[in-house]
Image (cartoon, coloured by chain):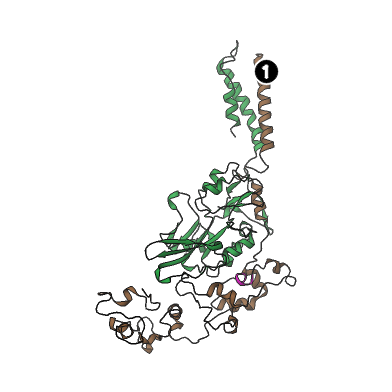
Chain colours: A green, B brown
Amino acid sequence: MSLIPSDCRECPPGSVEPEGVDRRDFVKKMAAACAAGVPVVLGVVGVPGVNGQTVDGERYDPTMHYYGMGVDPAKCIGCGRCVNACKTENDVPRTEGAFNTWVERYVIRNDGEVIVDSPDGGMEGFPELADEAGIRKSFFVPKLCNHCANPPCVQVCPVGATFITQDGVVLVDDDYCIGCRYCIQACPYGARWFKEEKRVAAKCTFCYHRIVKGLVPACVEACPTQARIFGEVEGRATPLARFIRFNEIDVLKPALNTRPKVYYANLDGEVR
Amino acid sequence: MVQQVPRLAIVFTIAVAILLGARQLLIPPTFGEDGHYRAAAVDSIAAHPIKYAGRQACELCHAEQAEVRLAGNHRGVGCETCHGPAAPHVQGPLDVKPVIPDTREFCVTCHSYNASRPTGFPQIEPARHNFPRPCKDCHDPHAPVPPVTPGECSACHAQIARQKSLSHHAELSCAVCHEAPDTHKDAPRSVRPTKPQTRALCGTCHAAGIEEGPPQIDLESHGVPYMCWDCHYPHFPETR
């Protein structure tokens, strides 16, 4: 949209000043000519409109939703069903480092040392802990894209291939992504990975294809202990709003001002 | 008309035409409709096929199992958590059958003992717990209950009972440390069971000088002035 002002700036008002046309007139005329061009430019660029997708005959209106997820680490049993379900649902390759969601195990030892492990993303569960007596406490933390309201990954994308939808989900347009991996570097949560097969960045979509059909994300569907709650962030009478109201809520790395929409209940201070 | 004006107008027209043409060529259709992205991408992402049908879809046909499940301890567990992604089965119920994971190996995915699991979550030691019988011999997977029923204390204090069952105190009954009047069952909040009050109670087993006993300490010096349960959780005692 920078076309119009730059055209005007190129008008060299000082250079053309023949008799009968003073500078003021000239500027006026050129401004009028530029203004006449505005509708043409807008016509090419396109006027913002409502995304008219329909799902199952009923129109899904993204402006009526704003999604987030609640995670209760105290309920997570580290079974890895969520990781498995996510891989199946989203055709995530079962290769190293390709995870939309994964489960971390925190082990805090008596001497204060914190050990975090996530063998295979926790997909096949976790091995038993050796030296149980030397452990102060241990728990599981499911992780995924935080669908930040202020996402660094979207900010750095040079082509506009990653974006926030109107319903608050951060997505990757993998037909438009150039595979520069800048977003993978920018994400402070390590939530993005590189899809070799298509040479694009990939990430959790909150199972966008499911939520527009009124289903919950696959990880939430598969979780046997309701450690994950999916729903609307806004409004009072939603499962997520209730979860947020009734628990002490933390987000990951709040100091980065990314404003995550994945809310953790009663999170241990060691979790990053 | 001054002669410069038409010349400039031609130059500007060409410049604008080139810019607009380049825009048209370089910017994909639907870019910018809803924001700084291709609006069509949202539709193509939304068109991804689903694999997990969701428990509501299962319940349309399998209402009987759903009813059993919703009344039991697996009420929160989705059908597809165990039976796998079932969207193909919903499309063609006779063509594709979901898996029935009736082996020990599958159940212990969640129920094997792991110290990182939350307190009270039902866990077993797979090598010791009725090996090698399949779990469903004793537990209904749709509404599992521990086969010991009716529970006395564990009916209400199941979390403590489950935790204790994994600990060194597994063999001790609740009554060893607590005295519960019968009326506690009718009025659980106003009539309370007793709790240990003295270090001597733990000393019954753990004081030095008892032969063939559990770990022993010197009651006079160990951990004074604290009570035993200030440091050790009696339902799952730490050894150090």
Task: Inspect this view and state whether residue B186 appears.
Answer: no
Q: Is residue A56 above or below residue B126?
A: above
Q: Is residue B160 above or below residue B15?
A: below
- Residue marked by disc 1: B7
What chain does mark 1 sit on? B
Amino acid type for the residue under numbered disc 1 = Arg
The picture places residue A9, in percent across and down from the top left corner, at 57, 25
Nearer to me, B129 or B198? B129
Q: Is residue A201 above or below residue B163?
A: above
Nearer to me, A150 or A89? A89
Magenta-span inclusion, residue A164: no
The picture places residue A61, in percent across and down from the top left corner, at 61, 54
The picture places residue B212, in percent across and down from the top left corner, at 36, 87
Nearer to me, B138 or B109? B109
Q: Which residues are magenta?
A: B78-86
- Count of all numbered marks drawn on residues in the image: 1
Residue in view at x 54 percent, y 64 percent? A122
Q: Quadrant of the N terminus of chain B?
A: top right
- The quarter holding residue A135 reads bottom left
- The quarter holding residue B119 reads bottom left
Residue in view at x 58 percent, y 19 percent? A12
| SS for callout 1 | helix
> Which residue lies most toward the top here?
A19
Q: Quadrant of the C terminus of chain B?
A: bottom left
The picture places residue B217, in percent across and down from the top left corner, at 30, 79
Magenta-span inclusion, residue B84: yes
A30 relative to B156 in the view: left or right:
right
